[in-house]
Image (cartoon, rainbow, N blue to C red):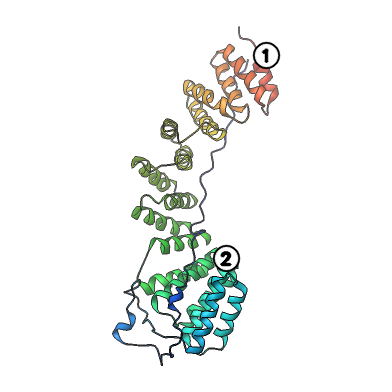
Amino acid sequence: MTAVRPSVFALLTVCSLATAVASAQVGRYNPDEVRAHHKQAAAASTSPTANASSAFPNATRVSPELEATKSGGKVLNEVVALYQAKQYPEAIQKAEALASVSTNAYERSFAYQLAGTAAADAGDKDKAATDFKLAVDSNGLNNDEHYQVMYNLAVMQYQTQHPADALATIDRLMTETTRKTPEYLGLKAGALAQLHRVAEAAPIFEQIHAADPGNNQALMNAVAAYQQANQPDKANALLAGAQGAGGLKDAAQYRSLYVGYLNDNKPKQALAVIDEGLAKGVIQPSPDLAKAYSVIAQDAYASGDAATAITMYGKAAPMAADGEPALNLARVLWNEKRFDEAHAAAKQALQKGVRDTADAKKLAGQKGN
């Protein structure tokens, strides 16, 4: 009988980039900050203490310490009550009505902030983005509130698929505050990824993970970004480093590393990762793992290592979704003149289903001499 070759498996797919800040929360206003029943400040203060801020002490913006008028503060308190009662449309309408007529920068900014928060809670992210931008542009809040609203704006721009706007906003925020928190950096990296600038996003995600090795989302986003930027060596190095530090915690992370090794033609390293994951109980037998074993078997057979190919196809066959690994096992066994074993493997392949039934039937029915 003519020797037959195992069929070729396509390389396994790598992990995809997760949504970096899909669950980012919009910062809420502080009801105690509604400065009702006070007179409007004549103008923004320029005193040395005006820039004092517990959250942004090094901000380049001079913090205006403005207050609401008595009438404006009354309306703002009414808006707060509507918001707290979850009467979002009414809260938005009253807040925007005040903002449209008030000449007080604080009242306008705070009203738009309330309207944006209500819109976000109501699920209208486009409306929220519009109102948060108006709050920032009105420039009437102190630095702590102003920059929280600016962050809210960036989040809404990102979540409404306006990454260029989100990137501009978050860059402005980091420049003016001289702060680069993990939240800010993550949002910037997410916007860059949305803009398909993954080569720029990857090192930012890596930076976030380096500062917080327990941040697995940052790790996997860095890995996916490096893979998409066609820099698999960097992705594999990150995962290998995490593995060495005991930082691989779930099956997806182990899979990303062994798939990365397979796609980089490093089957021995891939198998070592699989064995570790199985030993820890993190990886479980599955059709997907069967594909990985089949790739290792295919590589081994191509390099003349029939023994490893037989072992790997033998591992893949019982957990595969179909009979293709069993059929490849039968082919290799036949070529190695292990005819009875080839016969049994071909029968197993037919039971699970294969594309080439004719070849499987031939191997199942053929007897060696």
Residue 146, position as x, y percentages in the image? 43, 76
Viewer can see residue 192: yes
Q: Which residue is mark 2?
A: 160
* Amino acid marked by disc 2: Thr
Residue 62 left/right relative to 100: left
Picture layout, residue 189 above or below residue 220:
below
Q: Which residue is mark 1?
A: 365
Closer to us: 94 or 154: 94
Determine which quarter of the picture holds residue 360: top right
Residue 52, label in figure? none
Q: What quarter of the picture does the N terminus occupy?
A: top right
User: In terms of secondary structure, where does tag 1 sit?
Assistant: helix
Residue 198, position as x, y percentages in the image? 48, 57
Q: Residue at x 54, y 27 (%)?
A: 316
* Amino acid marked by disc 1: Gly
Q: What separation in Å lies between label 1 and label 2 (alpha carbons)?
A: 61 Å
**Mark 1 or 2, nearer chain start:** 2
* Direction right: furthest residue: 358
